[in-house]
Amino acid sequence: MPRRPVILFAAACAVIALALGLITMVVVGGRQQAAQTTDAATGQPLVGGPFTLTDQDGQVVDQSILEGKWSLVFFGFTYCPDYCPTTLGVLNAVQERMGDKAKDLQIVFISIDPERDTPQMLKDYLSSDGFPDDVIGLTGTPEQVAQVAREYRAFYQKVGEGEGYTMNHGLTVYLMGPDGRFRSAVAHDLGPSRTATLIENAMEKG
């Protein structure tokens, strides 16, 4: 074979080998990234993790409050005009539909507005009529709130300045098992009956 075609052939082989190597790196990297975002034991997304916050009674708590009970965790703020009070009202109806099974379920409300939501503010807010009994309200420093939001992949954003600012935030409710691990996302518009069924089914599976 003439020298020039040999050189071209060798160059083509090198390009193909390089392309195959890059494809392999992308595929393997993608698989590793996917593995890092799911729980190897349950196959569920890695949602939730360590946190340190303060409850509405001024007590410092951590992620261990989720252990031993099923938990519905969601992020909001006491000045929320619609979603947060509506969600709490729906969860109150969920507890009523679940009857005795609701004794194994706790509701955890994490404020994404630590600037205004002091423990006392949370306590007053969560005692409102129509809300579930014994909701655990949590707040903390801006850094602590940012950390727990990252652990749950929960979006929030301050909008505006001055006293009239508000907060944008995600609408997902997170169902956590008694081992503190994520079980399911609960859509905000699922309704009391379907939400109760989802939770009861998860409880049966363990």
Image (cartoon, rainbow, N blue to C red):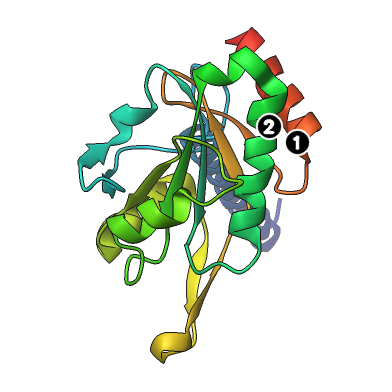
In the picture, measured across the screen, residue 5 lies left or right of residue 161, that is: right
**Is residue 42 visible from the viewing direction of this image?**
no
CB under 8 Å between callouts 2 and 1?
A: yes
Q: Amino acid at mark 1?
A: Pro
Task: Tell me the kind of residue under disc 2.
Answer: Val
Element under disc 1: helix
Residue 69 in the image: above or below residue 114: above
What residue would you read off at disc 1? 192
Residue appearing at x 29%, y 65% in the figure? 142
Mark count: 2
Extreme residue toward the front, this view: 129
Q: Residue at x 34, y 57 (%)?
A: 145
Classify 10 Å Cα crowding around label 2: few (below 14), some (14-19), many (20 and above): many
Q: What is the C-alpha distance between the residues marked 2 and 1?
A: 5 Å
Residue 37 rendering spot, x and y as whole percentages? 50, 38
Quarter occupied by residue 67? top left
| Disc on res. 160 | none
The answer to which of 26 and 85 lies nearer the viewer is 85
Query: Where does the image place residue 140, in percent across and percent down from the top left?
Result: 27, 56
- The local crowd at label 1, few if under 14, some if 14 to 19, many if 20 or more residues have their Cα within 10 Å, is many
**Residue 46 appears in the picture as rendered:** yes
Could you say where residue 50 lies in the image, as x and y percent from the top left?
30, 38
Looking at the image, residue 192 sits to the left or right of residue 76; the answer is right
| Position of the C terminus by quadrant | top right
- Judging by the rendered image, the residue that carries numbered circle 2 is 94
Between 66 and 149, the residue placed more toward the observer is 66
Residue 83, horizontal then vertical, whole percent: 65, 59
